[in-house]
Image (cartoon, helix red, strand yellow):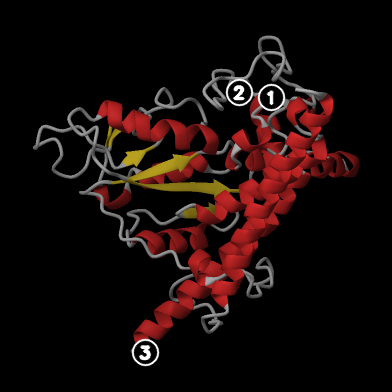
Amino acid sequence: MTSGTSISYKFYIFVVVLLATALFLFYDVYNSEMYECLTATYSSSNIALMNDRKPKVSRLFGVKTLDRDFQFDMEGNDVMVVLHIQKTGGSTFERHLVKLEHACKCIQGTKRCDCSRPGAIKKGKRDVWLFSRYSTGWSSCGVHADWTELTSCVPKYMAKKNVGDARKKRRYFYVTMVRNPINRYISEWKHVQRGATWNTSRHMCDGRSPTDKELPKCYKEEWLDVPLDEFMNCKYNLANNRQTRMLADLSLVGCYNLSKMPPEERNQAMLQSAKYNLRRLAYFGLTEHQLESQFVFEETFKLKFDVPFEQTNSTNAELASVTPQQYDRIKQLNSLDVKLYEFARTLFFQRIEWMDAKNRNATRE
């Protein structure tokens, strides 16, 4: 392939990604015009919102995106898949999930639970309704598998593990938590300081893991006590824009081969893909809004948590000492995540308005 042909091909791929996203956005906005916009005030009996932290919400999304009303069939063929992004409160969220309506049996003192479908074992089957760290383990699709990995791996894993049910048609419901990118980044840095590296992550994309050349390590064996400036200076640090990368379809940008696209085109394609996938997820919550996240989940799936969500007032990220210059650098390194988070907040609160209005209308009827 000549140089000119290669550039044309890259440009063609970039245009296709942007056009596909634009068409989806147009359809969703057009669809919203077919319905009356429902504005709502929040019911204090249902949910407590801090208005000073809630963004102003205008009608940006249509009914297809806002209306999350699934009848999750725990006893049937439905599977809830957790996309666990580092330092977003994912472990706490998963602990809530395994206690959901007493559906899982957990071994005390371990991170393993049996989340077989109710009655499945009596029928001689080992079919699970929850795909997560606590139920199926990291070995199933890799440590902190992202959207690209999970959507490729989970159906194959479920078909392989459930003997006799290989041709069973399942519905997959992907769920995740999203966090303020500045706090999430600082929290990851503090976690790496304590010894975390997630070096066993596979980062599978298009059937293979990245080469050492495509994804060099920022450390040799470990990165204990790494200073923040050193942490930020490694350009291959996956903490940078982690949420955007883990929610995007990396196949669209050549996986981890950075030579496939110019940096700006790659970034924009990745951000648009992450937004597209985020709005298609069955559910996402916000780490900074625990009660609201519980409300959205329960309204979405018609399931109730045994233990209420709690909001942590202080975290390691908020207690960390960061200079104004370092803060600005973190924001720059996570510019895609900043945009994605604002998108997520707007969508999240508009869904709450929609759900609350829908409930009030149903009560009136």
At mark 3, the secondary structure is: helix
Residue 112 shown left or right of residue 196 in the figure: left
Side (left or right) of 115 relative to 205: left
Residue at the (43%, 78%) spot, across then down: 358
Q: In this view, does 116 lie above or below 36?
A: above
Query: In 3D space, how far apart are the residues under numbered discs 1 and 2 (Cα atoms)?
Result: 7 Å
Query: Is residue 49 something that shows in the picture?
Result: no
Identity of the residue drawn at 50% across and 74% down:
354
Q: Mark 1 points at which residue?
A: 193
Residue 343 coordinates in the image, percent (x, y): 66, 58
| Pointers 1 and 3 in contact (C-beta within 8 Å) | no
Q: Mark 3 points at which residue?
A: 364
Q: Quadrant of the N terminus?
A: top right
Q: In this rendering, would 241 be left or right of 34?
A: right
Q: Please, what is the three-letter code of the amino acid marked with disc 3?
A: Arg
Q: Residue at the right extreme?
A: 325
Q: What residue type is labelled 1?
A: Gln
Instruction: Return the x and y of residue 134 as percentages of the image width and height.
Output: 38, 33
Q: Which of 171 and 218 is in front in this view?
A: 171
